[in-house]
Amino acid sequence: MSAQPASRYLDDLALLRPRIDALLPRFDRLILQGDALFPQAQGWALQALLLAYEAYADPAYLEKFVAIGDQVLGYRDSERGVRDYRGQSLPAWRAPARSSLETCWLRDVAGQPVFLVRAHRGLQPPRGGAWHGWVQVDVVVHEPGARFSLEVTRRTANGTTSERFDDLTMNPAPGAIGRGLPGNAAAMTVNTTSRLITLQPANTSVTPGSARLPERVIARFPAAGTSALADSPFVSCIYTGHLAWPFARFVRLVQDDAPDVKARHNATAERYLDAARAEIAANEV
């Protein structure tokens, strides 16, 4: 690279710094969507501070990162005492409402949960459509305790789409009549109405309402009827990644920096590394 372009870039950096510093007060408060952290914007704000430190080597940017980073960690579900749709309060951040999961329980004739139905809204709305739709699941029982069908319907401002899944059975054994639904894992995953629909047998990892499920898998049979899905908070790897990456990057910068910087921030870097690992481990989807 010639000296002239390099000099120009240095001049550009000098011109940019006042503009960067003028924006710093905006970073003092968390960026929220409703009661959830806005992961992209908050992650970009943290990344901007690290990039500014790399460009100008001013430790004030690292100090600012720590001040904001501690606020971000303080807003994790486990710190706020809020729970995801499974009833778990994890060291991560629930996704904003517009990217939420939608869930409902299919129950047996006694009202006990059999399957949790999950519909992932996805990152983009349907073509020309709005974010929010209405998903319902109809259970049609052909032989009580043996075979049933599911019809998944989605209604939006753009119209109604539906898909039917026939001849389902609770029997996972080879040779069983119908499409077996195993009783100890995610039972069925289908792409339907622009969403990913999954059925998960009731087990101890999910708490419907406030009632903890028994230790064993509940092997009941879904009752006929219609169930509507509702927005349910969940932890998304996409959103967690926006927030975990800056903490991991901070750790690398401190470890590779001058001894005085490492001495000042090493304990914080170790704390942030533990937090980033816990955040990644908390991801479900």
Image (cartoon, rainbow, N blue to C red):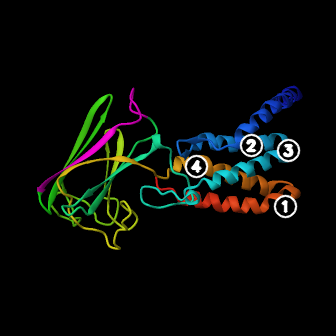
Instruction: Using the image, tell me which numbered label, if any, was put on residue 241.
Output: 4
Give how far apart the Cα atoms at labels 3 and 2 are. Answer: 10 Å
Q: Is residue 65 left or right of residue 189?
A: right
Lower sequence index among marks 1 and 3: 3
Question: Would you call the spot at circle 2 few (<14 residues within 10 Å), some (14-19), or many (20 or more)?
Answer: many
Q: Which residues are magenta?
A: 125-142
Instruction: Name the secondary structure under disc 3.
Output: loop
Lower sequence index among marks 4 and 3: 3
Q: Which residue matches tag 2? A: 49
Q: Residue at x 62, y 52 (%)?
A: 244
Name the front one of labels 2 and 4.
2
Give how far across and how far down residue 11 sits, in percent. Answer: 86, 28
Lower sequence index among marks 3 and 2: 2
Question: Would you call the spot at circle 1 few (<14 residues within 10 Å), some (14-19), or many (20 or more)?
Answer: few
Please name the amino acid that badge 4 sits on: Gly
Figure quadrant of residue 184: bottom left
Figure quadrant of residue 14: top right
Instruction: Name the secondary structure under disc 1.
Output: helix
Give how far apart the Cα atoms at labels 1 and 2 are. Answer: 20 Å
Q: Which residue matches tag 1? A: 263
Give how far across and how far down residue 188 sits, in percent. Answer: 30, 55
